[in-house]
Amino acid sequence: MFKEAAVLAGLVFAGGYVAGAFGPQHYARTVARPQAEVMAALADLDVTAQPGAPGSTAAAAGGVRPLFRLEKAADHMTWYVMSGDKVATAMTATFTPADDGKATRVTTDVHRGDAPDDFVSPAFRSEGITAGLFGMAVEDELNKLVAPPRADAATCQALLDRLTDDNLAASETQSRASAERGDGGRIAGMFGDHAKLAMRLGAQEAELRRAGCANPGAGADFTPASDTMR
C-alpha cells in the first residue's frame, strides 16, 4: 500500500511537469474537445479541492473565509477569490479554438488583487502558489473530460502493481549507479536521475489515464491492500 501511495503521489505532478504544462504564472494545454465542451467541463472547477484544501476555512485568513465568484465571457472564464468586498486574486482561463474547432487551447493567468494579506488565505496571497493550484485544478477537469471509460478494479490494480515494481527496480538501479559514481559524480548524476524519474512518472501517468485508471486512489473500487509484503 505504501509503495502504491508513493507512486501515485508523484504521477499527476510529474506528468504536468514533464509536459511543460506548469509555468511560474500559467498553465497551457490543447485538449481535443470543442470550446463549448471545455468551458462546460470547467464550470464546476473547485480550487479548494486541491491538496491542503486551500481557502476552505477562515482560520488561516484572518477570520474571513474567501468566496469564489465566476464570470464567463465568450473566450474566457475568470474566478475571483473575494475577501469581503475586495479581490484577493483573479484566476482566468482563456480558450482559443484549434484544429478547425475540434480542439481547444487552454491557457491560464493569475493576478493578485487589492485585498490585504492579513485577510487573504495564504494560498491566494502569492500569484505563484495560486497559479500552481489553479493549473492543477484545470488539469484535473480536463483529464476527466477526455478520460476513457473507467477500467475495472482488477485491471487497474494489476497495472498499478506493475508500475510500482518498475519504479522500485529503477530506483535500485539508480542507487547502485550513484554508489559506483562516488562523491565526485554524485551531484551531477543526481540531476540526471531526477530528470529520468520525472520522465518515467509522466509516462506512467499517461499510461494509467489511457487505461481508464487515471485516479486509482480516489474510490472504493479498488481492492483492499494486503498486509503481505510484495
Image (tube, helix red, strand yellow):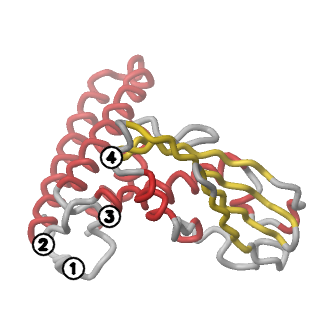
> In the rendered structure, which amino acid carries the disc numbered 2?
Asp
Q: Which residue is mark 1?
A: 221
Q: Which residue is mark 4?
A: 32
Calculate the distance from the C-alpha at mark 1 to the C-alpha at mark 3: 16 Å
Q: Residue at x 30, y 65 (%)?
A: 215
In the rendered structure, are the residues bearing label 4 and label 3 in contact, judged by CB atoms less than 8 Å apart?
Answer: no
In the rendered structure, are the residues bearing label 1 and label 4 in contact, judged by CB atoms less than 8 Å apart?
Answer: no
> In the rendered structure, which amino acid carries the disc numbered 1?
Asp
Horizontal side of residue 170 vs 184, given as left or right: left
Q: Which residue is mark 3?
A: 5
Calculate the distance from the C-alpha at mark 1 to the C-alpha at mark 4: 28 Å
* Mark 1: few/some/many CA within 10 Å (<14, 14-19, 20+): few
Calculate the distance from the C-alpha at mark 2 to the C-alpha at mark 1: 8 Å
Q: Position of residue 163 (x, y in %)?
A: 18, 52
Element under disc 3: helix
* Image depth: mark 1 or mark 3 in front: 1
Q: Which mark is residue 136?
A: none
Q: Which mark is residue 152?
A: 2
What is the tally of numbered marks visible in this picture? 4
Is tag 4's residue or tag 3's residue first in the polypeptide sequence?
A: 3
Is tag 2's residue or tag 1's residue first in the polypeptide sequence?
A: 2
> In the rendered structure, which amino acid carries the disc numbered 3?
Ala
In the rendered structure, are the residues bearing label 1 and label 3 in contact, judged by CB atoms less than 8 Å apart?
Answer: no
Is tag 2's residue or tag 4's residue first in the polypeptide sequence?
A: 4
Q: Residue at x 65, y 76 (%)?
A: 56
> In the rendered structure, which amino acid carries the disc numbered 4?
Ala
Element under disc 2: loop
* Image depth: mark 3 or mark 2 in front: 2
Is tag 1's residue or tag 3's residue first in the polypeptide sequence?
A: 3
Calculate the distance from the C-alpha at mark 4 to the C-alpha at mark 3: 30 Å
Is tag 3's residue or tag 2's residue first in the polypeptide sequence?
A: 3
